Amino acid sequence: MSIQKDSRRQFIKKTSSLALAACLPSINARAYEKMNEPFPFGIERGKPLDTCATGEWWNWKGDVQMSKFMQERPRSKVIAYAVYTHDRGILKMTAQLFPLYPNEPDEVTLEMKGEDGAWKIMDQQKIVYPGWSAHFRLDNWDNTKRMNYRVRLANQAAFEGTIRPDPIDQEEIKIATMSCNSHRDETVTERNEYIRNLKFHDPDILFFAGDQSYIHEHHTYGILLFGVQFAEIMRDRPVIMIPDDHDVGQGNFWGEGGDVADSTAGDSGGYYYPASYAKMVERCQTWHLPDAFDPTPIKQGIGVYYTNIRVGGVDFAIVEDRKFKSGPKGKIPIMGPRPDHIIDPSYDRKAVDVDGLELLGKRQIDFLHQWGQDWQGAEVKVVLSQTAFVEPCTYTEPWKIAY
């Protein structure tokens, strides 16, 4: 998504407190002073990021559809959706909000409805900026009970849903798997046919395998668009969500353990945009997953989320198959239009078998080994990842590839 240069210049030019007061009369000087940092990711490589959801987002005019979607959201509906998981006595939930004005509440409340029908406050958490998400963790969770929940922004907005009990007594466990949420039909804010079909099958768990957003420089817009589309089905069942290459703003992604990539093509390995942007993406999409197996950050302080979750006796391993993967550029012989393409049927397969290259990385291999040996509470094992391990490249014209 491109932003016109004139619009960028207009956004970058700081608005005075008087101009802001004219735009939002209810904001006082103190609120203005506390206004969120306008460029939380810096202005690296010549452009700010997430500008439709940061700083004075209400003045942003970089794209008609995006600004309309972000700025015309009714203030009673600024909580877009909530997602949760629960396992091993821990419930984790993320509430995702639209951008807020400086004079609006900065804290979200999580409530559960008791048997008497009254709402009980379970936790209150500050909204995390950038990203506009709030995160809840409840220990000693009883996963045998069905509970109605509500996340609330003071008395202004609320979003309700249901915490399902673990379906351990079911003979069949259903998982709905989805990925690559196209932005080409982004004017449609509801996916009625998808939701209708999903509700018909009533899956016990949802798996979004990546590319929830294709809006590279504006993840908050992308994840809100996705969330509004799928909120109705996500509100009442566990959700596994993991980011892929486009979510972090790249056309392809080999994480290289957290290195810095030399372009958004990503083939040199690493992240092109600042680490703070990647951390925001992962916070919004993965915080609600069970705790990471080994939370030690990688390079640039970027976190990890590989873990497992048990649902109805099925033990799902969630891996980050791109985060530790070696970038192909400069490491293997070039055999096609891209460093990861092999189009010559006579190529020497040993030429790409180079010492030191990583696929999942030792840390995840250790995790999978331990996970594979531990069958406590599990009858079936399933591995979930962003991509499949069936060909050397992640994008190709199949008729030109030598298998």
Image (cartoon, helix red, strand yellow):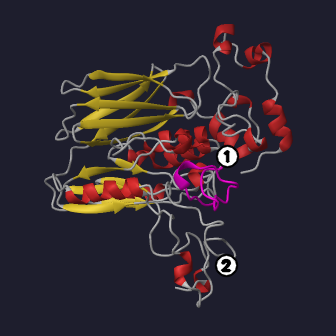
Quadrant position of residue 51: top right
Query: Is 270 included in the stretch rendered in magenta?
Result: yes
Query: Is 209 included in the stretch rendered in magenta?
Result: no
Q: Is residue 399 above or below residue 280?
A: below
For the point 61% across and 72% down, the residue is 332
- Relative horizontal placement of residue 143, taking residue 211 as reference (left or right): left
For the point 52% across and 85% down, the residue is 403
Query: What residue does disc 1 label?
Result: 217
Q: What mark, if any, has residue 336 been given in the picture?
A: 2
Q: What mark, if any, has residue 44 been given in the picture?
A: none
Report the magenta stretch's main SS: loop
Residue 300: percent from the left, percent from the top? 56, 41
Q: Residue furthest front?
A: 355
Query: For the residue marked with disc 1, what is the amino acid?
Result: Glu
Residue 359: percent from the left, percent from the top? 47, 63
Q: Residue furthest right?
A: 6
Residue 189 in sight in this render: no
